[in-house]
Amino acid sequence: MSEKVHVIHQGIDRADPAQAPPGQVAPSDLRSVMGRFATGVVVITVGGEHIHGMTANTFGSVSLDPPLVQCCIAHTAVMHGALSAAGRFGVSVMGAGQESVVRYFADRARPLGEAQFDVVDSTPGPHTGAPLLTGALAWLECEVVEAHVAGDHSLFVGRVLSCEPGDDDGALLFYRGRFHQVVTG
């Protein structure tokens, strides 16, 4: 025996031709829904001849044994080419007081190459040479072990070579298109 299921779509007018056809999701709808999922914020960095930094919130743990993490990078991002070429990367988990640093690495008008690190304090990671940002909640250094095309992004899986916690002064979160601070106390 089957039941009819009635789905209520709040805020989506399926009669609007700008919306995706039934069974498909419009990118704007997915962005709106995913914006309701609070995430941490990191700055992903690559050292060496492809030195670059990028703010990201698509980062997470994949496995503890072996230690693996993942990040998703748009094919059109400078970081995509830099990370593909370097094969190693650093991750700085950003704290509550680091919104200005996060905004800086999200700004496409900032300088490229080594010059983008002139205005932030960082230390080259001992395993990757990737800049690790001073004052972060934590740092990881990783080696790319897999890369998968996933629509307009690539999903990079990195084996963690080293990781270290920093001072816990609270986290920086991204929620509904804005930054929020979670302070410990």
Image (cartoon, rainbow, N blue to C red):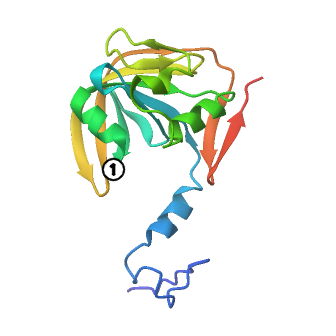
- Image quarter of residue 104: top right
- The kind of residue on which mark 1 rests is Thr
Q: Residue at x 41, y 22 (%)?
A: 114
Which secondary structure lies at badge 1? loop
Residues 20 and 109: in front is: 109
The image shows residue 86 at horizontal and vertical percentages of 25, 27
The image shows residue 150 at horizontal and vertical percentages of 28, 53
Quadrant holding the C terminus: top right
Residue 66 appears in the picture as rendered: no
The image shows residue 67 at horizontal and vertical percentages of 33, 24
Q: Residue at x 38, y 76 (%)?
A: 24
Write down the residue under mark 1.
76
Q: Residue at x 34, y 21 (%)?
A: 47
Q: Residue at x 52, y 41 (%)?
A: 106
Q: Residues within 10 Å of mark 1 (few under 14, many from 20)?
A: few
Name, please, the residue furthest toward the bottom.
Answer: 15
Residues 26 and 132: in front is: 132
Query: From what the image shows, is residue 47 above or below residue 127?
Result: below
